[in-house]
Image: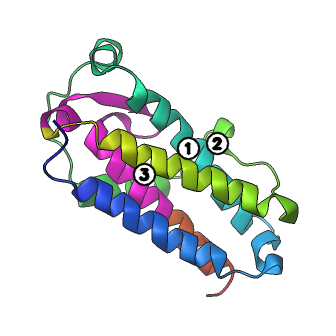
Amino acid sequence: MPSLNNAHIQELRNAQAEFLRTIHALSNEEFVREIPGKWTAGQHVLHLFLTTKPVNIGLGLPKFLLKLLFGKCSRPVLDYDGVRSAYSAQLTGGAKSPKMYVPKVVALDQREKVLGLFTGATDRLMALAEQYDDAQLDLVQLPHPLLGKITAREMLYFCAFHIRVHQAAVERDLGR
């Protein structure tokens, strides 16, 4: 039975749509503009694809296997603001993206490809989320490289917030 409370999916849908509006509004020059020490907008898009892909793999596994691999959650589940606070604290403490999620250079001729990868991955994430009921969202855990084991619901909230973090970075870096 699908989740009755789809706030996690709606949050993802909103984050995806707003991020895509921001990226589509960029000129080609802005999409590939290099700022020392910062990622280009294209690299932010690719990073979001790279980080969403393993979440999709995890959520696509049988739920019993996730419980076997990562255990069941036995603590109170964080809401969106709780996940945001926990992740923000990691960033404030100096946490960086693991190397496997650091994007390579994205050339202008790859713009549509990386946007398609991001859109496809986030669309898949929302479709997988719809296959979980509320109890499963709060019981099943997945590993996060900075937050440790978090529930499926918390991971979905993380993914939405993560998109917003990178949208804000694109806007800040381009002076928007």
Q: Nearer the viewer, residue 159 or 12?
A: 12
**Above or below — where is 46 with respect to 23?**
above
The residue that disc 2 covers is 101
Task: Name above or below for residue 57 compared with residue 11.
Answer: above
Question: Height in image: 112 above or below 19?
Answer: above
* Mark-to-mark CA distance, 2 and 1: 6 Å
Residue 75: percent from the left, percent from the top? 14, 34
The x, y position of residue 40, in whole percent, is: 74, 66
Position of residue 88 measured from the top left corner of the image (x, y, whole percent): 40, 58
Report the side of 36 relative to 147 (left or right): right
Q: Which residue is drawn at the image coordinates 33% and 52% (left, top)?
A: 157
Image disc number at residue 149: none
Provide the secondary structure element on which disc 1 rests: helix
> Is residue 72 a member of the stretch shown in magenta?
no
In the picture, residue 43 is in which quadrant? bottom right
Q: Amino acid at mark 2?
A: Tyr
Residue 139, given in percent of the width and then of the height, sits at 19, 30
SS class, disc 3? helix
Are dots 1 and 3 in contact, CB under 8 Å?
yes
Residue tagged by mark 1? 51
Q: Point out the tag, 2 or 1, that comes first from the N-terminus.
A: 1
What residue is disc 3 on?
159
Which residue is depicted at the point 21% across and 22% down? Answer: 72
Identity of the amino acid at label 1?
Thr
Range shown magenta: 135-163
